[in-house]
Image (cartoon, rainbow, N blue to C red):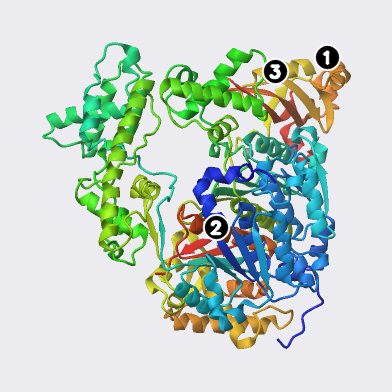
């Protein structure tokens, strides 16, 4: 066997040993193993997920050979779940792969407790009625749920979890935590000890920009009644002052100081996202609170007290032009402050745990440390029950999406006027309409050849009544899109399934590793011109 | 379900798109079994790269109605490929990717024929590439994309009014990923921006200044690059550093650790050393699957016309939530690669040698050591030595004669391009016009070209 670390090298560089360990502990259940489901699992099995259980009651038909790589000629007439399972096992022998030859709808109706054994359920190609039932079951059992569906050139991915909290959200771009406008005493002392007017040109051009900005800010404050530059004019003036301090044009440290001066101008204190989290009612903790909220409660206390309206210091600094000595010392200074902040928070966490009757050591040092390092980047994602969204979609949101400028690409008739609306929103409505259609007529529109005209007019009627039920009276979908939906005939095209399955698997990874931020709302794939859209109908 | 299903067919799902008329389709879309047959029998697709994207592309195309595929890749399978390149198993490590990938897909999808080419993309001549109706790129290097782009664009012909002739455009689909992010794009030379038109989308990689490495290292990568770029040469003299040799890598790591200790810098690990030295881009199965499938879907739509196509650049970002965006980039009308070509006006007496010398001075070309081809014929080749010797005698002949006394035509020059003090190999299109030919004016050319 290959050294697993080597095999997973390229992904360990993304989610680390901890993320990998979470994946290897997870047990995933897949409902329906057509190409959408099979492709979702393929990506997870390759990544080394702990176990998979495939639920599908169908037998392999010739049509399946044309859209699913996990079955081949030898699979014909056999259990699809079994064939897909055996191919997936071939991809990674570290994964425990199981299958159950049963229709998911039957399990949902007769054995709801079946689902509580899993970390996460991926439900593919389910119609609305089953989605709603399964959503209730999984919420009750606290099992994460992802819906994925491919339908002709459209499809959807939706997450349904009561609450998902993220410590390591790992955003691409985030303002460095340097405290330039609010330096703690040791940083100020360190900066003051370095003379910006040093004569030696080599020393002059190796003063790190953090020191330049802290000192120059002090100088500015002295002549401006203790305030920092705030107007555009003042900011420009401050940058000119920096420029004037350069002794030669090649001083990268001063160029960096000018470029980084916006970090000095930023408002001190925590951002609005974090403010919302510490003001969440869950931050009033009790015996049933999760570790995350216990730590948020401690963070809230810290911000109000020792932190002086700031979150704990992150402790890392970006690379910058500097002598090695200054840089290494600066780094140590930030780390020391970060460690001190952590110790305060840790103490507060232990006290809170004691107060709510939990073991004060039940949250590890490493977890608290990671929480402190990422305190400014915490994320809380909550997903509305599917039933709620379907029965009471937020009409203003829906209207907004219907007319979103960026996505207007198709004409629509409304109140005798032509409007341009998004194809993706049209698909959102039509994906629901085809399920109503199927409930009434026992097949999807255009599923079989012949009778297309009748299917089109029936789908149109169904869509109109759906829109009326949602309160979007007077709005009808374009003939073109309705025709396309009938043309699709519920086809599960391999390429579309691979996209939908790929997205679903990426979201599974984010949910299980508790890293990065999962999508919010319903992602509607638009395979016509790729102008897909994420709809948050809350 | 009263109605009986039509005869069982592997094409059950695809037929909905290929056999039924649609409203949101390409104007030239002609649904029917003939179209399905054309995809199966006539259309040839080339997949460039059999790595993370290439494996997915082969599978996706084989299950999208295409039956004649070829794949080209010079790499062999490594253990670190196995977390995403799903056609490879542990026992395949060391074997050529193209060959194993082709074999695996053919085993599973009956009726599909995939020809593997285990070689560098530069080893194939233009005739090889001109054989394909569409080229799908699954590459991780800018240089390789640039090369294939130039080859595909060289097939494009312009009419006498400088309008591209659609039937000569070989479309490309291109994908790329990094972690949770990726892009997919469609290139139709002459009609949408080519890779070179939007080369600014790929900014050059930032390198650390040598003085930082030598004098003021501040972080772990600085220590690693010092060991890799400076210390290695100091100690090993002429011996080239081989990133795939684990003894070499271990040596760099040990030296980096020593340097980090000397300066009190934390964070040097073996994994980071590999990452920095080999410039490893993190990669996962899901993103590769999404991007490749988007490329395969566009391939199907371009070839069949069964729907509209992506116009022309899709970005995917799954880091924070899910963001996808379509951007319609515009062509660079002066693009040296997909444009009508660089105009070179010559006297009929100019020899091939003189012409090659002129390319070095030409401000829009700056090409040295040029090899020249005309209508698939080698006029002069710098290498290999056999060809050089065979074509050397042409150097003293007038180019006009070598071009069969055609007053105005396209030449292809391959050579070293010296731009901004950087050398890169490149292929350029030249529109050669001979001055002062009796009876030939632009007016005459308009009708006769
Ligand atoms: Zn171009």
Foreground disc of the pair 2, 3: 2
Residue nearer the viewer, B22 or B243: B243
| Residue A25 - label | 2
Q: Residue at x 22, y 30 (%)?
A: A188
Q: Quadrant of ligand 1?
A: top right
Residue occupied by mark 3: B358
Give the Cα separation between the discs numbered 1 and 3: 14 Å
Give the Cα separation between the discs numbered 2 and 3: 66 Å
Q: Residue at x 51, y 66 (%)?
A: A158
Pointer 1: residues within 10 angstroms few (<14), some, or many (20+)? few
Question: Are discs 1 and 3 both within one chain?
Answer: yes
Q: Residue at x 65, y 29 (%)?
A: B246
Where residue A27 sits: x, y (%)?
A: 57, 63
Position of the C terminus of chain A by quadrant: bottom left
Pointer 2: residues within 10 angstroms few (<14), some, or many (20+)? some
Question: Are discs 2 and 1 both within one chain?
Answer: no
A444 up-or-down from B386: above or below: below
Q: Is residue A492 visible?
A: no
Q: Is residue B449 visible?
A: yes
Residue occupied by mark 1: B396
Q: Are marks 2 and 3 in contact (CB under 8 Å)?
A: no
Give the Cα separation between the discs numbered 2 and 1: 73 Å
Q: Earlier in the sequence, mark 1 or mark 3?
A: 3
Determine the secondary structure under disc 2: helix
Where residue A329 sits: x, y (%)?
A: 33, 26
Q: Residue furthest left?
A: A225
Q: Are marks 1 and 3 in contact (CB under 8 Å)?
A: no
Q: Residue furthest top?
A: A200
Pointer 3: residues within 10 angstroms few (<14), some, or many (20+)? some
A300 left or right, relative to B360: left
């Amino acid at each position: 066997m290959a050294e697993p670390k080597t095999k997973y090298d390229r992904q360990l560089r993304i989610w680390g040993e901890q993320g990998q360990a979470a994946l290897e502990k997870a047990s995933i259940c897949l409902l329906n193993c057509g190409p959408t489901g099979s492709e979702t699992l393929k990506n997870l099995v390759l990544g080394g997920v702990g176990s998979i259980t495939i639920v599908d009651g169908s037998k392999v038909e010739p049509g399946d050979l044309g859209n699913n790589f996990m079955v081949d000629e030898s699979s014909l007439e056999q259990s699809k779940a079994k064939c897909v399972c055996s191919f997936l096992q071939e991809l990674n022998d570290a994964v425990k792969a199981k299958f159950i030859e049963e229709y998911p709808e039957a399990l949902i109706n007769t054995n709801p407790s079946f689902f509580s054994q899993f970390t996460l359920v991926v439900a593919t190609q389910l119609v609305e009625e089953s989605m709603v039932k399964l959503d209730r079951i999984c919420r009750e059992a606290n099992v994460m749920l992802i819906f994925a569906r491919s339908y002709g050139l459209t499809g959807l991915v939706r997450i349904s979890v009561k609450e998902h909290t993220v410590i390591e959200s790992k955003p691409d771009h985030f303002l460095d935590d340097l405290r330039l406008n609010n330096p703690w005493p040791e940083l100020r002392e360190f900066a003051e000890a370095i003379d910006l007017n040093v004569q030696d040109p080599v020393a002059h051009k190796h003063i790190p920009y953090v020191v330049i900005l802290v000192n120059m800010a002090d100088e500015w404050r002295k002549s401006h009644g203790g305030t920092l530059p705030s107007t555009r004019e003042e900011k420009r003036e401050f940058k000119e002052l920096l420029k004037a301090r350069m002794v030669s044009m090649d001083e990268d440290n001063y160029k960096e100081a000018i470029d980084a001066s916006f970090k000095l101008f930023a408002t001190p204190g925590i951002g609005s996202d974090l403010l919302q989290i510490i003001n969440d009612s869950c931050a009033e903790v009790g015996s049933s609170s999760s570790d995350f909220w216990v730590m948020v409660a401690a963070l809230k206390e810290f911000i109000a007290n020792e932190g002086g309206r700031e979150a704990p210091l992150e402790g890392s600094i970006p690379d910058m032009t500097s002598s090695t000595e200054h840089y290494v010392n600066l780094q140590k200074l930030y780390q020391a402050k970060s460690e001190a902040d952590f110790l305060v928070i840790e103490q507060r966490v232990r006290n809170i745990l004691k107060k709510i009757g939990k073991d004060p050591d039940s949250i590890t040092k490493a977890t608290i440390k990671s929480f402190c390092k990422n305190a400014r980047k915490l994320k809380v994602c909550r997903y509305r029950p599917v039933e709620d969204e379907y029965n009471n979609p937020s009409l203003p949101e829906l209207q907004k999406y219907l007319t979103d400028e960026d996505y207007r690409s198709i004409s629509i008739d409304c109140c005798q006027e032509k409007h341009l609306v998004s194809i993706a929103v049209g698909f959102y409505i039509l994906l629901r309409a085809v399920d109503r259609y199927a409930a009434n007529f026992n097949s999807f529109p255009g599923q079989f050849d012949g009778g297309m005209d009748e299917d089109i007019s029936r789908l149109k009627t169904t869509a109109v009544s759906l829109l009326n039920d949602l309160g979007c009276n007077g709005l009808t979908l374009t003939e073109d899109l309705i025709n396309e939906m009938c043309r699709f005939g519920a086809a599960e095209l391999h390429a579309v399934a691979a996209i939908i399955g790929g997205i679903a698997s990426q979201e599974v990874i984010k949910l299980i590793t508790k890293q990065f931020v999962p999508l919010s709302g319903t992602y509607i794939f638009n395979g016509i011109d790729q102008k897909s859209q994420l709809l948050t109908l809350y | 379900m009263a109605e009986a299903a039509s005869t069982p067919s592997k094409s059950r799902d695809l037929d909905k798109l290929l056999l039924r008329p649609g409203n949101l389709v390409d104007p030239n879309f002609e649904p029917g079994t003939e179209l399905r047959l054309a995809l199966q029998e006539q259309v040839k697709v080339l997949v460039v790269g059999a790595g993370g994207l290439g494996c997915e592309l082969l599978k996706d195309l084989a299950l999208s109605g295409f039956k004649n595929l070829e794949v080209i890749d010079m790499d062999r399978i490594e253990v670190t490929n196995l977390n995403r390149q799903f056609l490879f198993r542990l026992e395949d490590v060391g074997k050529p990717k193209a060959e194993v990938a082709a074999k695996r897909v053919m085993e599973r999808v009956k009726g599909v024929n995939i020809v593997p080419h285990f070689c560098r993309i530069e080893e194939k001549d233009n005739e090889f590439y001109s054989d394909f109706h569409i080229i799908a790129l699954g590459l991780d290097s800018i240089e390789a994309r640039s090369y294939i782009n130039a080859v595909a664009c060289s097939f494009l012909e312009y009419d006498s009014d400088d309008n591209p002739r659609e039937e000569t455009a070989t479309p490309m689909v291109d994908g790329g990923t990094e972690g949770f992010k990726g892009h997919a794009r469609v290139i139709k030379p002459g009609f949408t921006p080519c890779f070179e038109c939007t080369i600014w989308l790929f900014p050059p990689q930032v390198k650390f200044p040598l003085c930082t490495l030598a004098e003021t290292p501040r972080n772990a990568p600085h220590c690693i690059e010092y060991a890799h770029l400076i210390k290695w040469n100091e100690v090993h003299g002429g011996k080239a550093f081989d990133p795939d040799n684990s003894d070499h890598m271990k040596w760099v790591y040990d030296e980096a650790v020593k340097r980090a200790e000397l300066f009190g810098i934390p964070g040097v690990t073996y994994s980071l050393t590999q990452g920095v030295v080999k410039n490893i881009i993190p990669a996962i199965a899901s993103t590769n699957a999404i991007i490749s499938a988007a490329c395969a879907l566009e391939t199907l739509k371009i070839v069949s016309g069964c729907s509209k196509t992506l116009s022309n650049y899709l970005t995917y970002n799954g880091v924070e939530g899910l963001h996808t965006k379509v951007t319609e980039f515009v062509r660079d009308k002066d693009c040296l690669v997909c444009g009508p070509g660089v105009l070179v006006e010559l006297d009929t007496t100019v020899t091939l040698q003189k012409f090659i010398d002129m390319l070095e001075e030409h401000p829009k070309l700056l090409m040295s050591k040029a090899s020249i081809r005309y209508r698939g014929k080698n006029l002069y080749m710098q290498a290999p030595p056999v060809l050089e010797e065979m074509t050397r005698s042409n150097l003293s002949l007038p180019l006009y004669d070598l071009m069969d006394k055609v007053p105005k035509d396209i030449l292809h020059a391959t050579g070293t391009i010296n731009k901004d003090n950087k050398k890169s190999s490149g292929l350029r299109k030249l529109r050669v016009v001979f001055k002062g030919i009796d009876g030939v004016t632009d007016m005459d050319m308009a009708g006769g070209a």
